[in-house]
Image (tube, rainbow, N blue to C red):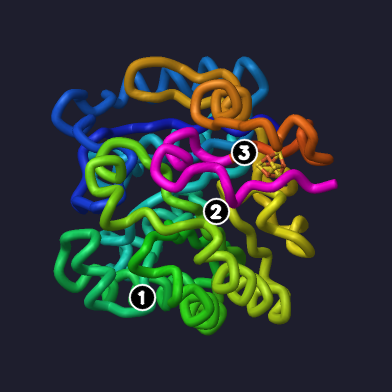
Amino acid sequence: MKRIDLKVWFDCNNMCLFCVQGDKRFKHKPRTKEEIFAKLEEWKKDWATWVVFTWWEPTVHPDIIEAIKYAKKIWYTSIQIQTNWRAFADYNYCLELIEAWVNEFAPSLHWFNPETHDMLVWVPWAWKKTVVWLANLQKLKQFVLMNTVITKQNYKELPNLATLFIKLGVSQFQLAFIHILWSADKNKIEIVPKKSDIIPYVHKALDIGKKCGIICMTEAVPFCLMKWYEWAIAEYNFMPETEVFDAECTIESYAEYRWNEWKAKWSQCKICKYKNICEWPWKEYPEIYGWDEFIAVK
Ligand code: SF4
């Protein structure tokens, strides 16, 4: 099934220190309703049935409900909204989105500790509102795909976060290693952890998810650091091919774009048994910590 990723708006009501979109919010106008409808129609002619309304924050777009209804009208069967949380603390807004036909909710929560979460997304009460929202979605029996960005500040909390997600009834969670672009690049010394430091906590969080029968996965953690946990590597096991309607261009294959533009390999990768399927680390990562952690798997 073809998945499309439709960025409707480049503004956001958070100001996360690890944001990969950075200053785009000051450079690009929101997409108009007509542009969104036209893009949905164009992709529909190409047999797309799965649309993700996404960054920046789609819930602040004035026409988001109409856009979702239009996607349903022209037969998109899977409609996902990726969001930071805010509007959904309101139960009625959750109902409005469900009635419009959102059937996958993809929010993010990054810390088990509320104060740390609020500080790193720069919004007071953000953690509490996200948790209220998740409880609302749980009551409404919705499909929730949770996303957590792994940083220096949260990696030791990942097992606790996994336990919290399970209590809140999420259907799936993904632990994504921070992508070192824009705001994340500016703050890299403070927030980018060493991959080998995070691994024991990542594995423990995956153990918790697996034991409870939850789909759980990692993003941007190569095979050589995931021995016995290869089943959780999102790029290899879970990520569907996606076309992305971004601010400046359309990326026809997000997977190819990641490999060709965003990832880097080194001499060990050439002799590694995973060389044809591994996506390697983000190319900015070795500039901070070098390559020593990535040893070829024989
Ligand atoms: S050595 Fe390179 S190819 Fe092998 S798993 Fe690690 S990053 Fe991937």
> What span is in magenta?
281-298
Find residue 43 and report its horizontal and vertical position in percent: 56, 20
- For numbered disc 2, what is the local secondary structure? loop
Query: How crowded is the residue under tag 3: few (<14 C-alpha within 10 Å), some, or many (20+)?
Result: many
As shown in the figure, which amino acid type bears the numbered disc 3? Trp
Q: Which mark is residue 118?
A: none
Q: Which residue in the protein does label 1 denote? A: 131
Q: Which residue in the protein does label 2 denote? A: 103
- For numbered disc 3, what is the local secondary structure? loop
State how far apart marks 3 and 2 are (Cα): 32 Å
Circles 3, 1 touching at the beta carbon (< 8 Å): no
Q: Which residue in the protein does label 3 denote? A: 280
Q: Name the front one of labels 3 and 1.
A: 3
- For numbered disc 1, what is the local secondary structure? helix
Q: Is the distance from the Cβ of mark 1 to the nearest ligand 1 atom less than 8 Å?
A: no
Q: Is residue 275 left or right of residue 158?
A: right
Q: Nearer the viewer, residue 40 or 214?
A: 214
Q: Name the front one of labels 1 and 2.
A: 1
Residue 75: name its quadrant.
top right
As shown in the figure, which amino acid type bears the numbered disc 1? Val
Residue at 42 percent across and 43 percent down: it is 179
Q: Which of marks 2 and 1 precedes in the sequence? A: 2
Q: Is residue 85 left or right of residue 237?
A: left
Q: Is residue 138 visible?
A: no
Q: Nearer the viewer, residue 223 or 211?
A: 223
